[in-house]
């Protein structure tokens, strides 16, 4: 799913960029645009959107169901802290997997850009790769990774919080799941804007 | 009666309100070592709420609860955990973790709180499951077994750490008569041989009279009667007699019929409607 999304985005980006840049006679900058947009913005954001929809909602629903079926209370009564037992592993998994998926998504997205440049524009493979690598520096990758780690923290915190605070049966689980997706998306997009402006103004 | 040392549970003037509703109203009792106390009463009389207070998952509005001589109402979560290691709790639904197998569920407290080796834990799990009549069920998942079985697995899990005190929320509802007898005998055996204390919330009068050394009857959030099974059986209190004999007619009011009654009497509109009218009137 991540691969398909990332590939589509890479292809679309390249075509849109080619369309605009062609009118300026600057198609040679297509790889730059694809590379930078993916690494800095679209990669982390889109992968986070997918993970919110797929894993964030699943975590909220799972913990919510455990809450309404007394499982959380049972853990507490067995003197097992539900945060240690349930939240910490999910937190760590998210913190590792979201940046990892982002790197993977970036790679596939860049492949998408390559497909357009190679088959629709006058690029050869080496030219695309060189151009793309030249345009980006490691900081572009790192800034994307920082974003991705922050998003991971936001997504899993909101999901676990929504799940553990479910009240009132199956309906409550549904409400909490929806709320977690909506809140996580909003928080993630606003944070993205804030982080981008921090990176932008700090150089 | 059984005054060997301090009481294990001591509840004093316990009051719990949800908004305006008083669910537990000034409850005081104590439970001594080796006693099996059955708490009974109609649905919604506050039995489960009382149990939740005893295990420290709800805080009372006022009053005190002492477990093993320690006040738990003012304790921090970390300290309550220490007390919780000394008791087991069987939930009404069993409350098994759906993501683990039956065996893993029973093994969970052992794996989390003891330094036993996996082989040892496996032995204990087998033995506990055998106690509740579920040999060779370790590898099934909770959704593959029946409600009554879940409850028995819950009991095996509650007993995994050999607790001094066991709380059970309706341990026998949903079990067939034979299994009910097995669970009751198990409770009796543990109380006799290991000196375990038990607090059992139950509707099931046959089972209650079989295991109880003392009974407490709750009604409308307060204690209606308490005493030995014989005292309860011979109680002159009509509410107690109605409950233990399961009669539909008697002094215990049914909430449903009360509500209908009220609707017939009261002619003015329902509260939420009148609030809405008021809202409209306020507008110019």
Image: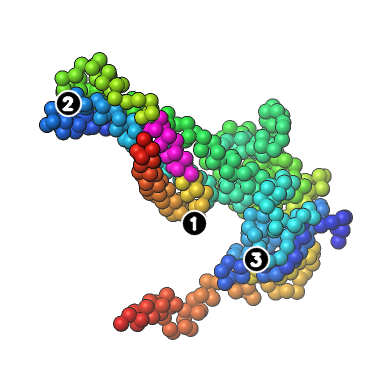
The answer, for residue A193, to whether it is visible in the render is yes
- Image coordinates of residue B226 in percent, x first then y, are 76, 66
Query: Is the image coloured rainbow, by chain, by secondary structure, or in one colour?
Result: rainbow
- Report the disc number at residue A13: none
Where does the C terminus of chain B fall, quadrant-wise? bottom left
Q: Mark 3 — residue?
A: B61
First-in-chain label (2 vs 1): 2
Left or right relative to A201: residue B265? right
Q: Which chain carries label 3?
A: B
Q: Is B50 above or below relative to A52? A: below
What distance separates the C-alpha of mark 2 from that of mark 1?
Answer: 57 Å
Q: What element carries label 3?
A: loop
- Report the disc number at residue A27: 2
Q: Is mark 2 on a helix, strand or loop?
A: helix
User: Which region is colored magenta?
Assistant: A142-157
- Report the disc number at residue A168: 1
Neighbour tally class for label 2: few under 14, some 14-19, many 20 plus, Cα within 10 Å:
many
Neighbour tally class for label 3: few under 14, some 14-19, many 20 plus, Cα within 10 Å:
some
Give the number of callouts.
3
Q: Which of marks 3 and 2 is in front?
A: 2
Neighbour tally class for label 1: few under 14, some 14-19, many 20 plus, Cα within 10 Å:
few
């Amino acid at each position: 799913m991540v691969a398909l999304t990332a590939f589509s985005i890479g292809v679309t980006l390249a075509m849109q960029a080619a369309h605009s840049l062609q009118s300026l006679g600057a198609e040679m900058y297509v790889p730059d645009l694809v590379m930078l947009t993916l690494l800095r913005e679209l990669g982390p954001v889109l992968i986070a959107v997918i993970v919110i929809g797929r894993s964030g909602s699943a975590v909220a629903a799972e913990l919510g169901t455990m809450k309404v079926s007394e499982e959380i209370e049972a853990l507490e009564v067995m003197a097992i802290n539900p945060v240690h037992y349930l939240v910490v592993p999910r937190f760590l998994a998210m913190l590792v997997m979201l940046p990892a998926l982002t790197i993977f998504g970036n790679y596939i997205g860049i492949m998408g850009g390559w497909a357009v440049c190679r088959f629709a524009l006058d690029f050869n493979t080496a030219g695309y790769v060189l151009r793309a690598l030249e345009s980006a520096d490691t900081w572009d990758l790192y800034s994307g990774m920082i974003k991705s780690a922050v998003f991971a923290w936001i997504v899993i915190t909101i999901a676990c919080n929504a799940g553990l605070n479910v009240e009132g049966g199956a309906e409550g689980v549904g409400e909490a799941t929806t709320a977690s997706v909506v809140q996580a998306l909003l928080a993630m997009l606003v944070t993205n804007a804030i982080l981008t402006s921090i990176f932008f103004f700090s150089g | 009666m059984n005054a060997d040392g301090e009481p294990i549970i001591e509840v004093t003037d316990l009051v719990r309100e949800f908004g305006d509703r008083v669910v537990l109203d000034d409850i005081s009792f104590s439970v001594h070592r080796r006693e099996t106390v059955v708490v009974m009463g109609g649905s919604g009389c506050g039995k489960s709420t009382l149990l939740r207070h005893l295990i420290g998952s709800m805080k009372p509005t006022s009053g005190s609860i002492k477990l093993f001589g320690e006040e738990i109402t003012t304790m921090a979560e970390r300290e309550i955990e220490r007390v919780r290691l000394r008791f087991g709790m069987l939930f009404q639904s069993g409350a098994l973790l759906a993501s683990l197998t039956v065996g893993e569920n029973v093994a969970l407290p052992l794996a989390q709180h003891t330094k036993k080796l996996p082989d040892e834990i496996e032995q204990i799990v087998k033995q506990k499951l055998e106690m509740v009549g579920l040999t060779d069920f370790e590898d099934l998942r909770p959704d593959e077994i029946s409600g009554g079985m879940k409850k028995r697995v819950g009991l095996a899990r509650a007993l995994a750490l050999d607790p001094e005190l066991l709380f059970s929320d309706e341990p026998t509802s949903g079990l067939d008569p034979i299994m009910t007898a097995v669970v009751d005998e198990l409770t009796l055996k543990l109380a006799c041989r290991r000196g375990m204390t038990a607090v059992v919330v139950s509707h099931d009068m046959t089972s209650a009279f079989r295991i109880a050394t003392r009974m407490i009857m709750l009604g409308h959030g307060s204690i209606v009667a308490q005493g030995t099974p014989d005292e309860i059986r011979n109680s002159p209190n009509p509410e107690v007699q109605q409950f233990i004999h399961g009669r539909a007619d008697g002094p215990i009011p049914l909430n449903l019929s009360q509500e209908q009654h009220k609707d017939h009497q009261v002619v003015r509109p329902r509260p939420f409607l009148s609030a809405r009218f008021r809202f409209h009137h306020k507008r110019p």
